[in-house]
Amino acid sequence: MALDVGPVDAPRLILLALLGWAAWRVIYNQYFHPLAHFPGPRWAACTRLWLAYTEVYRGISLSDIRYQLHRKYGDIVRITPDELHFANPDAFGDIYNAQNKWDTDYRLYRALGMDAAALCMVKYEAAKQRKDALSPLFSRQSTMKMQNLLKTKVDSFCNALTAQHATKAASDLSLGFRCLAMDVITEICFGRSVNVTHTHNFQADLVLALEEMLPVFTLSKYSVLIIWLLRNIPRRLASYLGSPRLSSLFKFQDMLKEQIDGVFRDPAQLEESLYPTIYHQLLSPAAHKGRPLPSKLSIFDEARVLLLAGTGAVGMSLTTTVHYVLSISGAQESLRAELRAVWPDINTPPRYEVLEKLPFLTAIVREGFRLFPGATSLPRVVPPGGAVISGVHIPGGTVVGQSFTFVQHAEAVFSDAHAFIPERWLGEDAKPPEASTLAFSRGPKSCLGINLAHCEVYLVLANLFRRFEMRVDKSRPVDLTYKEHYAPSFSGEHLHVFCKPIKV
Ligand code: HEM
């Protein structure tokens, strides 16, 4: 006999079917899922909503959640129904290495709302092709060629510090480093610097707007609606919900769109540029080896990723490093003495190639990158055949990851791991240099800007410590506690430093 479903019963039936499906998913995830035997909170195994509740509603940073879970459940924790997180530092190399051509997990990468950029492409092959096209712009050779341009930006930054000191005020270096990094990345990528270093004490709206955007990425991991809004929200509403500063971000995006329209309309204008930009690379048929060139939208997404990636990590790792150097008695004097030996005349700074050979400066750079809480757990999808991670077979399709701090801050790898000890990179028992580049990840999705980041960090530290006597403003003690929103965000008191110029 046919079931007589009237118009009133249909919604009820749909609701019942949905509830039944949800109940079945919970039971399946708990008892029959291939990851059912991995330890973790019961509700985390049932539904992703547990993590959303803990991270978004309770406001606990994902990095803290992971440490708490590993303390309770051991080395491998099931953090959502289909995701495992590893505490054992050996897992890092099993997940992030050049041989693993694994896809990335769409839930994190799509959440950034820039799907058509290499970083957010979840399929290995597509991401690699795009990255290969961009890489020459950020090679070591190319970075060396751009050094004079970097030097100009660092000089402007130092002039801003000098001007601020003339008013007897401390400089907000947390923002200052990000302003400088933003000036550099916009000049290199788009041939047009935003010049935010000139903003009074570095309070640049564009930099602050990027910081305000970070928590949105934590929300968008759990909601497609927010991802949609990221692209489509009316500007007025965004500024109302967020802050008026967002308008500076919108203006910048308009500038990018205009630029992209311009190069599509008249590619010949690229020939006028003094340096190659991302447009030269992304619109070069040779760089794409005969494959179709990216669309306007795709270039726009790439540009936005570069702005984000090239600003925050450089700025925050410099903040971390300078804070620690200034917290060790005598460290800035030792560094200055080393710098003076290769830079006796203050008006004739050495090139990066000289600076990168200085042992103490190098040890400081490495230790700074190690302590910077850099990347979150970057989720990768185990291929269908499964994989062995940390000595355990993990089924295909599992999302796996390890927060970099589980290696960089692990006592088993670095003794007294939370202390800033540049000496661990010096002498006969020195740690191998590659251990300091973990912060840039490993394998096919490792950082595109590693050469540029090193060059910037060396030039900035050398200029700061050779050209200024620095003293922390103790009335405003810095707080480097961070919250994880894809990238870490330092939401506490900024690093304020009196920077007194050195004349000779
Ligand atoms: C201290 C500075 C930096 C650190 C610690 C850092 C770290 C990282 C890490 C860990 C990743 C991997 C992200 C993932 O797999 O999700 C990454 C990717 C990336 N970084 Fe950096 N980064 C830094 C500076 C820069 C700079 C200056 C640029 C500018 C060009 C840049 C551009 C990128 C891009 C475009 C990607 C995506 C690569 C891909 O699509 O596979 N980064 N970075």
Image (spheres, rainbow, N blue to C red):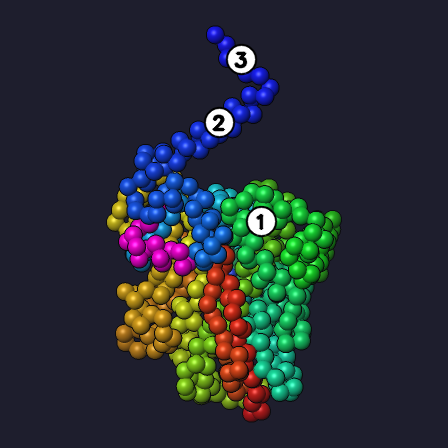
Q: Amino acid at mark 2?
A: Leu
Q: Is residue 55 above or below residue 195?
A: above
Residue plotted at (29% across, 52% down) = 73
Dot 1: element: loop
Circle 1 sits on which residue? 114
Residue plotted at (47% across, 54% down) = 58
Q: Amino acid at mark 1?
A: Met
**Quick check: 29 left or right of 119?**
left
Q: Position of residue 424 (x, y in %)?
A: 33, 74
Could you tell me what secondary structure mostly forms the magenta stretch? Answer: helix
Per the rendering, the mark at residue 16 is: 2
Classify mark 2: residues with Cα within 10 Å, few (<14), some (14-19) or many (20+): few
Residue 468 on the magenta span: no
Q: Position of residue 372 (x, y in %)?
A: 44, 67
Dot 2: element: helix
Lower position in the chain sequence, tag 1 or tag 2: 2
Is residue 308 visible to the viewer in this orientation of the structure? Answer: yes
Disc 3 versus disc 2: distance between alpha carbons? 16 Å
Residue 66 on the magenta span: yes
Disc 1 versus disc 2: distance between alpha carbons? 36 Å
Residue plotted at (54% across, 56% down) = 215
Which residue lies most toward the top here? 1
Stretch of the chain drawn in magenta: 63-78
Q: Which residue is nearer to you in this view: 376 or 28?
A: 28
Mark toward the viewer: 1 or 2: 2
Circle 3 sits on which residue? 4
Q: Which residue is nearer to you in this view: 308 or 174?
A: 174
